[in-house]
Image: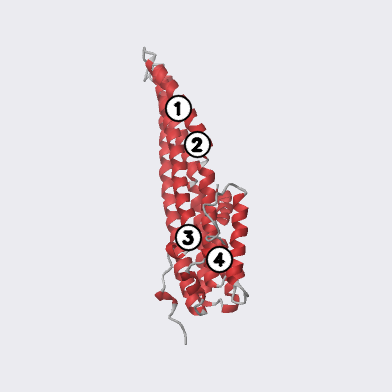
Amino acid sequence: MAATPGPSTTVNDDDLPPLFQVNDRMALVHQGESFRVVRTQLVVLLLATATASMSERVNSRVPSWIAAVLYVLTIAIGVHASRRRSRLHWQAHRAAAEVIKSLAWQYMAHGGPFHSRAANPEALFATRLEERLSELRKVGWEDQREGTAGHGIGQITPMMRAIRAKPFAARRDIYLRDRVVEQLIWYGNRAGQAHQASVRWSGMTAVLTLLALIASVLRALGVIGRWDLTGVLSAAAAAGVAWQEVRRHRPLTYAHSLVEQDLETLRVAMSTTVTEEGWADAVAEAERLVSPQHTDWLVRFGS
């Protein structure tokens, strides 16, 4: 007798391997720290530039000392950031989380190497998982597991086993709804957010650059006398450009939009024309499209 159709099942992060949840949380923590450090460094550097500019206009050494302290603080923040290596830890934990999540979904959906003909899918999952994590250890990923209980097969949850045991139609519905459509929404939202941020920061940088030009012209004409804001405005514009480079708004808009388009095309095919015989390859292709490596590859072309 056929099992209950897929739409009655909703898979969330709690149903995925525990190691995914740990790495997902740590990636978010290190990502936030990485952005905060860069933002703080840019703001302090801008304040130092503004204070140094002011010291040239007032009859006091106080602004010069304040500027010196701020420049030292900027250097200290940079040294602290290099020691913390937040960006490296963020990227390593994010890569680990996405590897685990992708393998889990392929296992559940009978995708890629975990097709229906696989003799021992649980042992294969354990092997593939530990192989991929071993590769990540070489680039700085830190394994938070203690003992052997959380290794290999120990990462397969009851929900993962239950979904894998369902018939093809149910697995297809669950994968399309809870993985493919969820990723479509995520990439669409991120593309829109990145585009809005790119427009906002590009506009702000353009305005600051224009103001620096106006200040330079007024200074040349002698209209603003001793107060020359060109340096401060130029530094602010440069900080805006640097922040855009850190957040990669424009290339991420390009990459996320392309992934969304390709994933929607694949979703339609998987919903209509892909048979059970071709399902494993289709799932593997979907996981390739949503992998961080694929996004990074597209980002290089959108830069």
Which mark's residue is nearer the viewer, 3 or 2?
Answer: 3
Mark 2 element type: helix
Q: Nearer the viewer, residue 231 or 145?
A: 145
Kindly indicate whether the residue at mark 3 contacts the one at mark 4 (C-beta within 8 angstroms): no
Q: Quadrant of residue 45?
A: top left
Residue at left 60%, top 47%? 139
Where is residue 176 drawn, in percent x and y? 48, 70
Mark 3 element type: helix
Which mark's residue is nearer the viewer, 2 or 4?
Answer: 4
- Residue where numbered disc 2 is placed: 81
Q: CA distance from mark 3 to mark 2?
A: 29 Å
- Residue where numbered disc 3 is placed: 18
Q: CA distance from mark 2 to mark 4?
A: 37 Å
Instruction: Tell me which numbered mark, 3 or 2, is placed earlier along the sequence.
Output: 3
Kindly indicate whether the residue at mark 2 contacts the one at mark 1 (C-beta within 8 angstroms): no
- Residue where numbered disc 4 is placed: 153
Instruction: Tell me which numbered mark, 4 or 3, is placed earlier along the sequence.
Output: 3
Residue 274 is left or right of residue 58, and the answer is: right
Kindly indicate whether the residue at mark 4 contacts the one at mark 2 (C-beta within 8 angstroms): no
Q: Residues within 10 Å of mark 1 (few under 14, many from 20)?
A: some
Mark 1 element type: helix
Where is residue 280 drawn, in percent x and y? 59, 72
Mark 4 element type: helix
Instruction: Tell me which numbered mark, 1 or 4, is placed earlier along the sequence.
Output: 1
The amino acid pointed to by label 4 is Ile
**Residue at the outermost top position:** 59
